[in-house]
Image (tube, coloured by chain):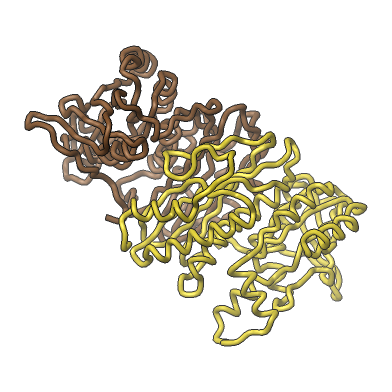
Chain colours: A yellow, B brown
Amino acid sequence: MDVGEQELLTAIGKVLSGAGPEVLVGVGDDAAVVRPGPGDLVITTDVMVEGTHFDRTFTSARDLGYKAVVVNLSDIAAMGASPRQAVCALTLTDAVDAAWTMELFGGMREACDEHALWMIGGNLALGREVTVAVTVIGEVARGRAVTRSGAQVGDAVVVTGSLGGSAAGLKIAAGSAVSWSGDERDALSRHFRPMARVGEGQGIAHAGATGMIDISDGFSLDLSRLCRASGVAANIHASSIPVHPAATQDQALAGGEDYELLATIPPAAVVPLAAELMEQFGTRLSVIGEIGPGEGVTIDDAAGRRTLDPVGWDHFA
Amino acid sequence: MDVGEQELLTAIGKVLSGAGPEVLVGVGDDAAVVRPGPGDLVITTDVMVEGTHFDRTFTSARDLGYKAVVVNLSDIAAMGASPRQAVCALTLTDAVDAAWTMELFGGMREACDEHALWMIGGNLALGREVTVAVTVIGEVARGRAVTRSGAQVGDAVVVTGSLGGSAAGLKIAAGSAVSWSGDERDALSRHFRPMARVGEGQGIAHAGATGMIDISDGFSLDLSRLCRASGVAANIHASSIPVHPAATQDQALAGGEDYELLATIPPAAVVPLAAELMEQFGTRLSVIGEIGPGEGVTIDDAAGRRTLDPVGWDHFA
C-alpha cells in the first residue's frame, strides 16, 4: 500500500461522507450508531473473494465495489425489505494501491446511493488476497418479511427479469472477442454490474408472495432450496423460462449470479403484479410453473417431464 | 473441503441452533430477521485474516472463532452497548476440513453464549487464505452511546485491567519455551482468548464517561485517536499504567490486542466506578492520567515529561 492506514481511512471517510438523520455515529468510531425505524431488522452478509468471485485482471475496482454491495441488496430484496445501512470488512493486499481502493469505495458508494442506504462503518486489514465482506441491514414492516419457507400448493412460481445473462457474460469476458453484440454487452453488464431487484421485491411482497429467494447460486439450486424449506414440490415449464438473449438454457437453469427474484404467489395475484412491476420498474415478471405437493423440482419440455437436478454454485464441489 | 457446502451448512446450523424470541428468522434464509428493542443500534465489523492476525500452526480453530467474535464485542463494549446478534462471512481454504470448521463455529458459539448474543446468519466462501469477518449488532439506550469524541478538559483517563499481556503472549507463543509461569500462561490466554469488557463498558457508560475506545491497536495509538476525535490533549503517568506482569512497558504502551477499555470520566466518578467494577466483575480500573487542552499525548516518568508517539498496529506501515 502506498499510503498509511490512517491516511487511507481519512480518504475513505470522504468518499463515504454524508448520512441520513437516523445515523447518529458513522464511520470513524469503535462502532456505528443508528436509530432503528418501527419495522423489523433484516440482516445479511456476503463476501467477494479474489480468485473465487472475481479476477482483478477482468474486474475493475469500481465494478467490484458496486457488486459487493449489490449481492447483499439482492438478499434484502428477497425478504421484501428496504436496505438501510451497510458496513464493510475489507482485506487488501500489497498488489493494490490507494487509487484502486478509492475506486472500490466509489463503486460501493454508487450502489449505496442508488438504493438510499449508507455505508456507516468498516474495517481494513492486509492479507494475500482481496476480500470484500459487506453486511447490509434493512427494514421491513413488522412480521412482513417473506421467507423461503411459506410456499403453498397451488401457488404460481414467478421470476423477475431474465436468467443466464451473468453466466453468459462471464464466458464472453473470458473469451477472445474484441467486439460484442448488444445482447452480449448486456450479458457482460449482468455479470460485472448486476442489479438488485429491491423495488420489485417489495412489490412482490405486497402482492402476497408466500415464498421468495434471490437467484444467486443458480435457478435450479435456489428453487430446490425454496421447495425444501417450504416442504413442497415445483413443476417448471421449460418454454416459459425467460432465458437471457445471450445465454443458453443450461446457463439460465444453473448459471448463478443472476440476482433475479424467484417467488411463489397465489395465481390471482400474478396479472396485476406483472403489470405493476412493468409499469414501475420496467421489469418483466414471468410465470414459469406451479407449486404442488411432495418434494423436488420437475421440468416440462418437448421431451416430456423430467426431474430438474439442483445444479449450481457449490463452493466445495 | 471434505464435505459439500450444503452438508457443512446443515452442520453449522446445528452448532448455532437456538435463538431468543427477538430472532424471527435465523440461519438458513436469504437474510435474518430480528425485532429490534427500544434502543439505538450499535453496529461493528472486524475481520481476522490468516497470516496477518493468526497462524493456524499456533491458533486453534476454537480460539480463532472465539476471538473473531470477541474483537467485535470489544467495539460494542466501547460504546457502552449490549451485544444482541452477529453474522459471519467466512472464507475457507482447501487446507481446512469440516472438523476444523465446526471447531471454529464452536468457538464463536462459546463467545456468543458468554455474552447472550445470537449468531443469526452468515456466508461461506472458498479462497486461498482463511478470513473470518464477523459483524455484531448491539443495543444501547437511545442517545446514550459513548463515542470517542466527547472527552472534556479536566476528565480523568482510566483503563480497565492490564496492558501488554497480549503482545507478551504472542512473543511467548513464538518462543521455544515448553513450560511457562502463571503470568506467562495468563499472557498466552490474553492473546489467544481475549476477554471483551462488555459489562465493564456499560458500567463506565453509566458512570458518566465522556469518551471511550477499546485498546485494539495499541494504547498510545488508541489514546491519540480518542484525543484527536475529542479535540483535547492527554497526559499519562507512566507509573500508573497497569502493565501486565509478563509484559514490558513498551508492550503495554504499543502492543495492541489487549481489548481493554480506555475512557475519560469526570474525576468525581472514578472512585465509585472503580469499586463497582471490582465488585461486579473483579476488574481493576486504573486512573492513569488526565485530559487537558491542546492536542497530542504526553507521558510523565522519572526522566520528566515527553511526547508519547502514537505507535501501534498499522496494517500498511
Residue A39 shows in the view:
yes
State the image quarter where residue B216 is shown.
Answer: top left
Q: How many marks?
A: 0
Residue sitting farthest toward the front: B293
- Residue A64 vs A140, above or below: the answer is below
Q: Is residue A261 left or right of residue A83?
A: right
**x%, y% of residue B128?**
42, 61
**x%, y% of residue A72?**
60, 53
Q: Is residue A304 left or right of residue A283?
A: right
The residue under the point 20% across, 42% down is B309
The residue under the point 58% across, 46% down is A85
**Image quadrant for the C terminus of chain A?**
bottom right
Residue sitting farthest toward the right: A268
The residue under the point 80% across, 59% down is A280
- Residue A185 vs A95, above or below: the answer is below
**Image quadrant for the N terminus of chain A?**
bottom left
Say which of A146 and A80 sits in front.
A80
- Residue A45 vs B304, above or below: the answer is below
State the image quarter where residue B265 is shown.
Answer: top left
Q: Is residue A67 left or right of residue B95?
A: right
The residue under the point 84% across, 49% down is A207
Residue B11 shows in the view:
no
State the image quarter where residue B118 is shown.
Answer: top right
**x%, y% of residue A181?**
67, 84
Q: Is residue B48 left or right of residue A225?
A: left
**x%, y% of residue A106?**
50, 61
